[in-house]
Image (tube, rainbow, N blue to C red):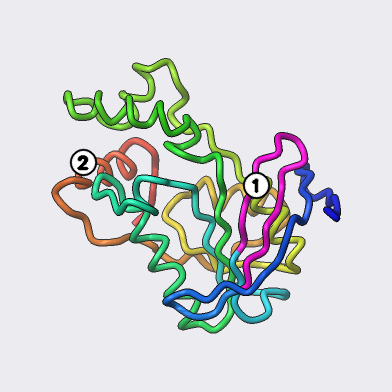
Amino acid sequence: MDSDLICTGAAIARAGKARLPTRHGVFTAHAYRDSANGVEHLALTLGNPAGAQTLVRLHSECLTGDVFGSLRCDCGEQLEWALSRIAAEGRGVLVYLRGHEGRGIGLASKISAYSLQDSGMDTVDANTALGLPVDARVYDVGAAMLRDLGVESVKLMSNNPKKLAALEAAGLPVVERIPHAVEENPENRRYLATKRQRLGHLK
């Protein structure tokens, strides 16, 4: 039975737990459900994540990158690299946040934004032209999942300052930010530049 948890403004429910063997090692998959909207999220842990200075990646769902290996973004490579880094460390958590597709605009809208990008717009202008937010993602559920797993402070694999700020605001100190940039390619060069120049992403 699900067990509701209240943490930093987010109500989540534990929804399942199982061993998950991957090419990077054997992780434990912890399924959670957002009690407010029913969206299901996943945390992959290796070793005991509880305590301080836990290696963490907050990863936003990206079907095109994570599953189909799209070269338009860096998401799939970031996901694989995060799992590899956690495996090398022997301890850590990857939080996979669903409902974050296209920075929160949804899969169909992201494909529409791709079409506008092919016509010359960058990702920011494409979302705006569709009447959609530039970035609608929130990370309170991710923070709640980490706190439920016993994480007290994190070493965060991220280039996004909003993720750092969100964890700090939720009472999870970020003791170290670990740059998490992958090598660019001709398809995602402009996308990565836009993240740095218009969205404030770090290197």
Residue 124 is situated, as x and y percent measured from the top left of the image, at 34, 29
Q: Which element is circle 1 on?
A: strand
Q: For the C terminus, which image quadrant?
A: bottom left
Disc 1: CA contacts within 10 A as few (<14), some (14-19) or many (>=20): some
Q: Is 166 situated left or right of 118 in this image?
A: right
The majority secondary structure of the magenta stretch comes to strand
Q: Residue at x 58, y 79 (%)?
A: 91
Residue 2 is situated, as x and y percent measured from the top left of the image, at 83, 53
- Of discs 1 and 2, which sits in the foreground? 1
Q: CA distance from mark 1 to mark 2?
A: 32 Å
- In which quarter of the view is residue 3 placed? bottom right
Residue type, mark 2 in image = Arg
Q: Residue at x 63, y 72 (%)?
A: 28
Residue type, mark 1 in image = Glu
- In which quarter of the view is residue 127 placed? top left
Q: Residue at x 26, y 30 (%)?
A: 122
Asked whether residue 120 is drawn in magenta, I would say no
Instruction: Note whether 88 is above or below 133 in the view shown.
Output: below
Q: Which element is circle 2 on?
A: helix
Q: Is 68 situated left or right of 101 in this image?
A: left
Q: Assess whether mark 2 and mark 1 are in contact (beta carbons under 8 angstroms).
A: no
Q: For the N terminus, which image quadrant?
A: bottom right
Q: Which mark is residue 40?
A: 1
Of 16 and 172, nearer the camera is 16
Of 185 and 155, nearer the camera is 185
Q: Extreme left residue here? A: 186
Q: Which residue is mark 2?
A: 190
Which sits earlier in the primary sequence, circle 1 or circle 2? 1
User: What range of the chain is rendered magenta?
Assistant: 28-43
Residue 33 is situated, as x and y percent measured from the top left of the image, at 71, 47
